[in-house]
Image (cartoon, coloured by chain):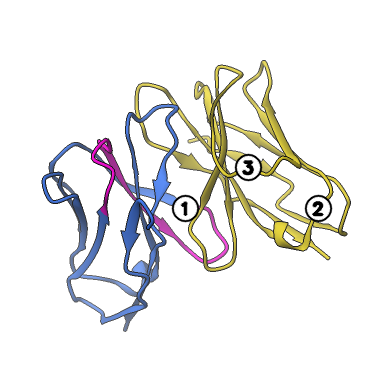
Chain colours: A yellow, B blue
């Protein structure tokens, strides 16, 4: 079965640079979530989209923005990167009828 | 105080043992309860998904929800070394596009 696809899997950036992460949800899933997981931490909810509209917002820094496109894929844009942004960024998708989240493998961002 | 509390462990058990993992929560609006398994450097993988109170069994895994006590459990029977991972409880108020709140995860090691 098709899963959530994230790219890139690994990304190395320097401080103050910009990074973009992409997420392709499971087919027919119209809800996308972004989570940030620091080393040894639980996943922290950043933002979610339902039918291309922002549906909820968590602890997402103002330096970050995200959107969901007409094909339901989503992109997380991170600017003015800081060392503390180094983490695993997970995308998850779900259908509105269930509550189950299905996660991608994650994108590991390292800021030097 | 976090909305969802989970003992971080680590929990070390011999192969074949019964494992009990638990979470407590404070938000009485939570209705959807999930358990995820996360291997190192991988995305969380959905194990069990339950709605409201009650038990759910799937193979060697049993999930229990006691909403009156705001307490959920995951039992693993006949534990295997391949069960060694971090187990995260997660819950949401309405499922679907509502954000999911995670526990901090319990690291489990099953010793052969």
What residue does disc 1 label? B44
The residues colored magenta run B25-43
Label 3 chain ID: A
Q: Are marks 1 and 3 on the same chain?
A: no
Q: Looking at the image, can residue B73 be seen?
A: yes
Measured from the top left, where is residue A32 in percent x and y? 55, 31
Compared across the picture, whether A23 is left or right of A44 comes to right
Label 2 Cα crowd, 10 Å radius (few <14 / some 14-19 / many 20+): many
**Eyeballing the image, is B72 above or below B9?**
above
Disc assigned to residue A60: 3
Q: Are marks 1 and 3 in contact (CB under 8 Å)?
A: no
Task: Say the numbered circle drawn on residue A81.
Answer: 2
Q: Is residue A112 shown in magenta? A: no
Determine the residue positioned at 76% across, 42% down.
Answer: A63
Q: CA distance from mark 3 to mark 2?
A: 13 Å
- Residue shown at 32% from the left, 59% from the top: B5
Contact between labelled residues 1 and 2, with CB atoms less than 8 Å apart:
no
- Percent across and percent down for residue A7 are 71, 44
> Can the viewer see residue A76 in this picture?
no
Residue extending farthest front: B1
Q: Chain ID for label 2?
A: A
User: Is label 2 on the same chain as label 1?
Assistant: no
User: Sequence order check: which comes first, mark 3 or mark 2?
Assistant: 3
Q: Chain of mark 1?
A: B
Q: Above or below — where is A40 with respect to A27?
A: below
Q: Picture quarter containing residue A77?
A: top right
Q: Position of residue A44 (x, y in %)?
A: 52, 50
In the foreground, B110 or A98: A98
């Amino acid at each position: 079965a098709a899963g959530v696809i994230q790219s890139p899997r690994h990304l190395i950036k320097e401080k103050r640079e910009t990074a973009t992460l992409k997420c392709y949800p499971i087919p027919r899933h119209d809800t996308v979530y972004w989570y940030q997981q620091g080393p040894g931490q639980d996943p922290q909810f950043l933002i979610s989209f339902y039918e291309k509209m922002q549906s909820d917002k968590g602890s997402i820094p103002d330096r970050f923005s995200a959107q969901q496109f007409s094909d339901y894929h989503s992109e997380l844009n991170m600017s003015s990167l800081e060392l503390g942004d180094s983490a695993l960024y997970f995308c998850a998708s779900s259908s509105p009828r269930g509550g189950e989240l299905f996660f991608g493998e994650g994108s590991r961002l390292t800021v030097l | 105080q976090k909305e969802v509390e989970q003992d971080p462990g680590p929990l070390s058990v011999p192969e074949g043992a019964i494992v009990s993992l638990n979470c407590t929560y404070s938000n009485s609006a939570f209705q959807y309860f999930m358990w995820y398994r996360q291997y190192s450097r991988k995305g969380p993988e959905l194990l069990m998904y339950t709605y409201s109170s009650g038990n759910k069994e799937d193979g060697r895994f049993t999930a229990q929800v006691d909403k009156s006590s705001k307490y959920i459990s995951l039992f693993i029977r006949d534990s295997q070394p391949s069960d060694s991972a971090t187990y995260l409880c997660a819950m949401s108020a309405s499922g679907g596009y509502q954000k999911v709140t995670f526990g901090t995860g319990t690291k489990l090691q099953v010793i052969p």
